Image (spheres, grey):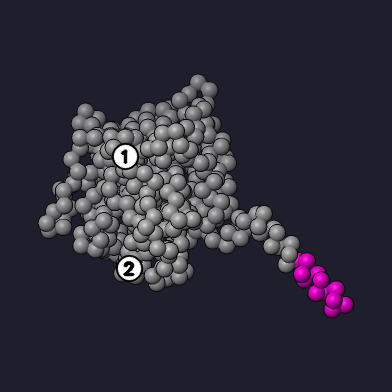
Amino acid sequence: MAAGLSSLAIYLVFSIGILLHSYPNIAAQARIFDPNRKDNLALYWGQNSFGVTHAGMLGQEALEDYCQNDSADILLLSFLNVFNAASAGGVPGLDFAETCKTTFPNTTLLHCPQIAKGIKYCQKQGKIVLLSLGGAAGSYGFASEDEARQFADKLWDMFMGGSADLRPFDDAVVDGVDLDIEGGQSTGYVTLVGRLREKFKQVPDRRFYVTAAPQCPFPDGYLGSVIDSAHLDMVFVQFYNNWCSALSYPSQFNFDDWDNWARDRSLNPDVKVYFGLPGSTTAARSGYIDPTELARIIPDVRSKYPSFGGVSMWDASQGASNKIGDKSYTQHVADILRANGDTAEPAQPEDTSKVPKGDGETAESTQIGIDEPTTPNPTNPSFTTPSSTAPTPSIKDDGAAPETTAVKSTGGRGHGHDHSQHKHHCCHRGRDE
């Protein structure tokens, strides 16, 4: 009898091992997104930044491919970059590079069933998926508070818990929206957030989120007044392409400004501030930090600032393609964040000082996919265009942020992504646009 039980136990252990080897995602099911943690990783996806900056090479993978393991906790679909808010019957404009090009019949509205499949898959893996609004290039903004209110209703019906005849992601429901606003006026955005939160109450058993992606100069030139007056769950601050980037750590690195805002001014006392980084040397004009240095910086920042929520990256394709040793940059960052669980103890990763720090030389600042600054179009305050001539903020001796023009880079995740040259040919702020 004992021998039989022993054989059965051996068989079960062997079978479970084979199962986990064949289906590694089963082992990863334990990590479920928790907004209160300090080791979350957010990835901007959609603009194919790596494919744009590396012609002829494979770039962006399908959305679900970035949810195969527990590296990422948040995926941000980039972007909804045309609002058409002034038209009651107008449809929003979406841009996901080459991932989705099909439109509903007789409309300009993208229909993306493959992305819908990815959204559902990622959510089943315990991640949340947000729709990022804006970017470094596009036509967006509001002429009135009423426009913003109506647009919030449209977002709810077409992408979240409402219903509409045409839904770009069919019955897939995104977990909220991200404001990656890199141009225009602040009119309407507080109303937009407030109206969405009213809508969220219609589905009391599900949590929805609203986030924002400012640049590190404080206050942000486009979102400063908005983040003070809207209830936000997270801010993905772009600590690159600016004088306050992590390259200046700790001298002019200004996470303390954002932590003070989170604790003293934010309407949400539990808001989390994310450390926005480019995923490689070609994801932004400046600000890339190699894993060895990050292993020193991240634990220090996390231990000092109560509002620290994790890292955000521009973008998924850049971080995954940037191989250092036997791991991607994305995995290095995830490992550093979680080296000691949800604590602030320092990580001890492999020494990468003798390995290339990126996947190539930094692309020209005018190349799409790079995190470039953007400038508002004076003839249309709701329009933002990439600009290779926009001045780069200079480092001020006193460490203060430049006037209100926190220049947003395009291409990365604007906030810290590579929005400088709309990822791909569209829009990301600070990433590779």
> Which disc number belongs to residue 300?
2
Quick check: 42 left or right of 180?
right
- Give the percent coordinates (x, y) of residue 52: 39, 35
Residue placed furthest toward the left: 397
Amino acid type shown at disc 1 = Ala
Q: Is residue 137 visible?
A: yes
Q: Secondary structure at mark 2?
A: helix
Residue placed furthest toward the top: 106
> Which disc number belongs to residue 48?
none
The residue closer to the viewer here, 317 or 183, is: 317
The residue closer to the viewer here, 250 or 53, is: 53
Which secondary structure class fits the magenta region best? helix
Q: Secondary structure at mark 1?
A: loop
Quick check: 82 left or right of 387?
right
State the residue at coordinates (39%, 59%).
Answer: 352
State the residue at coordinates (26%, 56%).
Answer: 247
Image position of 195 with respect to 349: above or below = above
Between disc 2 and disc 1, the foreground one is 1
Q: Quadrant of the N terminus?
A: bottom right
State the residue at coordinates (49%, 55%).
Answer: 326
The residue closer to the viewer here, 83 or 64, is: 64
First-in-chain label (2 vs 1): 2
According to the image, label 1 marks what residue?
A: 363
Q: Is residue 184 visible?
A: no
Amino acid type shown at disc 2 = Asp
Residue range of the region highlighted in magenta in the rendering: 1-12
